């Protein structure tokens, strides 16, 4: 295996590991492991429950809109697909990564409903994984699309 092939292998492995970790952390939101502490930070109330549900609903709507607007450009991987286009209209005029941010918001909503250290850990972990994934994706997008830097400068978040 040449140095070039090895470098490409490690890049692909890093891409895949970020996607795997993202989906793994998301899946952990649906399981409560008995051996992990589920201790609540503060007592949940009807207000925190309603607030969490509202955040989840808003984030889910944002996610659906971003999926629709990405269309055939949608991929779980940070590397854009071969014949993709840069989407900078619709919700993408206001934020560069609405789908990622909506995932974090959903996780925050679940944390607000549960108010446990376990869900706080999941939210922080998901945010960190998505931060790394966004950084990598933006490198790929800058290499693929000549006007991405202009778009990045115009749309800050």
Image (tube, rainbow, N blue to C red):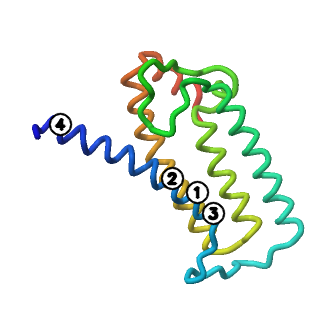
**Distance between the alpha carbons at the discs numbered 3 and 2:** 11 Å
Using a 10 Å C-alpha cutoff, classify the residue at mark 4 as few (fewer than 14 neighbours), some (14 to 19) or many (20 or more): few
Distance from Cα at disc 4 to Cα at disc 2: 26 Å
Q: Residue at x 34, y 47 (%)?
A: 14
- Compare marks 3 and 2 and give the one earlier in the sequence: 2
As measured in the structure, the alpha-carbon distance from the residue carrying label 3 to the one carrying label 1 is 6 Å
Q: Secondary structure at mark 1?
A: helix
Q: Which residue is mark 3?
A: 29
Instruction: Say what secondary structure mark 2 lies in.
Output: helix
Do tag 3 and tag 1 residues touch (Cβ < 8 Å)? yes
Which residue is pictured at 71% across the width and 32% down the height? 65
View extreme (right): residue = 46
Instruction: Give the number of the disc on residue 5.
Output: 4
Q: Which residue is mark 2?
A: 22
Mark 2 Cα shell of 10 Å, populated few (<14), some (14-19), many (≥20): many
Q: Mark 1 — residue? A: 26
- Which structural element holds mark 4? helix
Residue placed at 77% from the left, 52% from the top? 55
Mark 3 and mark 4: span between their CA atoms?
37 Å
């Amino acid at each position: 295996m040449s140095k070039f092939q090895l470098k490409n292998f490690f890049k692909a492995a890093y891409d895949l590991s970020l996607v795997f970790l993202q989906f793994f952390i998301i899946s952990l939101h649906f399981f409560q492991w008995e051996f992990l502490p589920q201790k609540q930070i503060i007592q949940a109330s009807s207000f925190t429950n309603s607030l969490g549900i509202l955040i989840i609903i808003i984030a889910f709507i944002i996610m659906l809109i971003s999926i629709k607007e990405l269309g055939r450009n949608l991929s779980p991987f940070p590397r854009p697909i071969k014949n993709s286009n840069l989407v900078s209209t619709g919700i993408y005029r206001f934020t560069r990564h609405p789908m990622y941010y909506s995932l974090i918001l959903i996780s925050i909503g679940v944390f607000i409903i549960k108010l446990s250290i376990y869900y706080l850990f999941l939210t922080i972990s998901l945010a960190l994984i998505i931060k790394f994934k966004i950084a990598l994706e933006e490198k790929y997008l800058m290499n693929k699309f000549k006007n991405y830097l202009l778009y990045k400068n115009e749309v800050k978040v």
